[in-house]
Image (cartoon, rainbow, N blue to C red):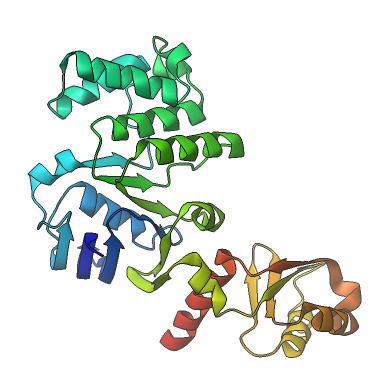
Amino acid sequence: MSSAIEARDVRRSYGERAALDGFTLDVPTGSVFGVLGPNGSGKSTFVALVAGAERPPGGRLTILGEVPHPRLRARVGTVFQENASDPLMSPREYLLFAATLFGMGGAATRRRAEELLERFGLASRAKDPISTLSGGMRRRLEAARALLHRPELLLLDEPTTGVDPEERRLLWETVRAERGGATVLLATNDLHEADEVCDLVAFVEAGRVVASGAPAELKRDLRRQTVRVELTEADPGIVERIAAEAGPGRVTALDGELVVMTDDAAALVPRLFAAAGPAIRGLRIEDASLEDAYFQYIQRRAEAVR
């Protein structure tokens, strides 16, 4: 399978801080590929490098089969983290203005703009100032602008941050319907979203790709279930007793919970209550998720570095 993006040992620094430090990745043509990592991991730096069609200071990068050069930007559509629209424009004006930047014009372009406004549920607000649109509507408008020229590569940098689940569903349904055969590169720290929409994902930490593959493949190596334990207080002694019952490398602290990986939750849970019953406020059992895979891989890398 050909690659829409191929990165080999890409490096980029801002002063003394290495934003990309040996970043290596292949994004297959036609895929929806998620780059997942926390803020500061390097995912947005990589998206910006591709969006700008820039040659990296170190390593090798090809985009749509070519070395980076400015003309490639006409084949790429980008939704950045921050909205780029002028709040004083209307959605229709914004799309037609964006079209001129891609050398588009005429009746066909106007029809395309109207079609996208309709598809993204913005037709009834086409003449209103963008400043009056909701946050979700503005994100949909950004997606419409990125798809206007029918790009071969669509870059989405945290496109649904701050929008509600219904807005997220609508945006993704429309993007999937409108992208045609375009490759989609999604940068996000929302692992649940990536699990739902991506064919392939890469986990990124400290400017490097830690692991990559289909979500199902990355979850397959995990123990089959996750036990999430909410404690009444963060007592190190209680955490140690739970870790002793779960076994080495099976417990991760996340968002005020202990995430325990196990292949037999039914057998483990009674032992957890026996070891720390009064300190357990709540407990639930889930099948292993992409989030669990992510934190297991990141934990392995952290331990290797130590």
Q: 150 or 8: nearer the eye?
A: 150
Total labels: the figure holds 0
Q: Residue at x 49, y 73 (%)?
A: 217
The answer to whether 272 is drawn above or below residue 117 in the figure is: below
Image coordinates for residue 148, horizontal then vertical, percent: 28, 29
The answer to whether 124 is drawn above or below residue 269 in the figure is: above
Image coordinates for residue 5, horizontal then vertical, percent: 23, 59
Q: 229 or 65: nearer the eye?
A: 65
Q: Is residue 111 left or right of residue 156?
A: left
Image coordinates for residue 121, horizontal then vertical, percent: 48, 22
Q: Is residue 52 visible?
A: yes
Q: Residue at x 78, y 86 (%)?
A: 241
Q: Residue at x 35, y 71 (%)?
A: 209
Image coordinates for residue 301, horizontal then vertical, percent: 44, 81
Quarter in which the N terminus is drawn: bottom left
Quarter in which the C terminus is drawn: bottom left
The answer to whether 210 is drawn above or below residue 243 in the figure is: above
Tell me which corner region of the image, top left, top right, bottom left or bottom right, holds residue 11. Answer: bottom left
Q: Is residue 293 left or right of residue 252?
A: left
Q: Is residue 89 visible?
A: no
Q: Residue at x 16, y 18 (%)?
A: 105
Residue farthest to the top? Answer: 127
Q: 162 or 6: nearer the eye?
A: 6
